[in-house]
Image (tube, rainbow, N blue to C red):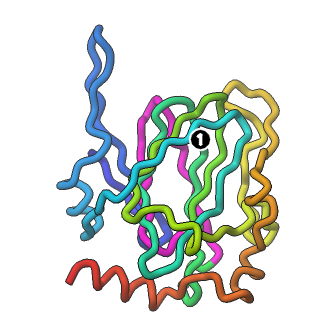
């Protein structure tokens, strides 16, 4: 397992070794040993989600109140998505920054984002299937969103799918109505870096 830290603290990519033969391919898409050695954290399995998206569908930017927050380990089982991690933690030196990682059924890479980070992706192929391992259950009362089209974030969403065909963002009504990052901050929806780091430390004690 090849592990790389992203430029946003609390996020990593995990690229597995793949073993192919005439029958197909085998890989470990999650390894507790590799994960804990790289992150210094434990990933509690509370819920697993699976989404299937048409090309152009954008899901996010989603995040949860901290505590308890919701850490996610995300991979693309089939198709391809551009996965985006957004630093929404007030007080962070990289507040408002984002990083994008291609997740697909070729490299079979995964992204881990700790509690307090925002998450979004755009599907680059019809039927893209994304699996999420989540550290806490879904709770609509503590779930929030930021507009993935916020010009202040300026996420560089792809304009073509992986076949080269034109692509335009397709959002749910809820995501389309989400506030900008600045508005979410004014509304007191965003977690602070101090609260996030304090909560993560409590999980290790």
User: Would residue 83 be found to the left or right of residue 173 on screen?
Assistant: left
User: Would residue 47 be found to the left or right of residue 192 on screen?
Assistant: left
Q: How many marks?
A: 1
User: Would residue 11 be found to the left or right of residue 24 on screen?
Assistant: right
The answer to if 98 sits in the magenta stretch is yes
Query: Could you say which is closer to the camera, residue 28 or residue 171?
Result: 171
What's the residue at 53%, 72% (across, down)?
64
Which quadrant: the N terminus? top left
Residue 135 rendering spot, x and y as whole percentages: 37, 63
- Could you say which quadrant of the image residue 115 lies in? bottom left
Residue 87 visible? The answer is no
What's the residue at 55%, 83% (across, down)?
191
Which quadrant: the C terminus? bottom left
Q: Is residue 195 above or below residue 70?
A: below
Q: Residues within 10 Å of mark 1 (few under 14, many from 20)?
A: many
Q: Which residue is mark 1?
A: 81
Q: Is residue 183 above or below residue 2?
A: below
Residue 92 rendering spot, x and y as whole percentages: 54, 85
- Could you say which quadrant of the image residue 160 lies in? top right
Residue 23 visible? The answer is yes
Magenta extent: 96-117
Residue 155 rendering spot, x and y as whole percentages: 71, 60
């Amino acid at each position: 397992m090849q592990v790389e830290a992203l430029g946003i603290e609390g996020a990593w990519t995990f690229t597995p070794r793949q073993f192919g033969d005439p029958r197909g391919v085998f890989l470990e898409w999650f390894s507790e040993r590799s994960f804990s050695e790289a992150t210094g954290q434990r990933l509690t399995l509370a819920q697993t989600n699976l989404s299937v998206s048409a090309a152009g569908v954008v899901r996010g930017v989603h995040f949860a109140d901290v505590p308890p927050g919701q850490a996610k380990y995300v991979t693309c089982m089939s198709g391809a998505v551009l996965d985006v991690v957004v630093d929404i933690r007030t007080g962070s030196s990289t507040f408002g920054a984002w990083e994008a990682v291609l997740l697909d059924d070729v490299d079979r890479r995964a992204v881990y984002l700790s509690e307090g980070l925002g998450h979004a992706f755009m599907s680059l192929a019809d039927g893209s299937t994304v699996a999420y391992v989540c550290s806490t259950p879904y709770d609509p009362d503590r779930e929030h969103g930021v507009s993935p089209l916020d010009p202040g974030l300026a996420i560089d969403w792809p304009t073509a799918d992986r076949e080269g065909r034109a692509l335009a963002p397709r959002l749910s009504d809820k995501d389309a109505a989400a506030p900008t990052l600045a508005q979410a901050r004014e509304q007191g929806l965003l977690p602070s870096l101090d609260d996030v780091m304090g909560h993560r430390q409590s999980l290790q004690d």
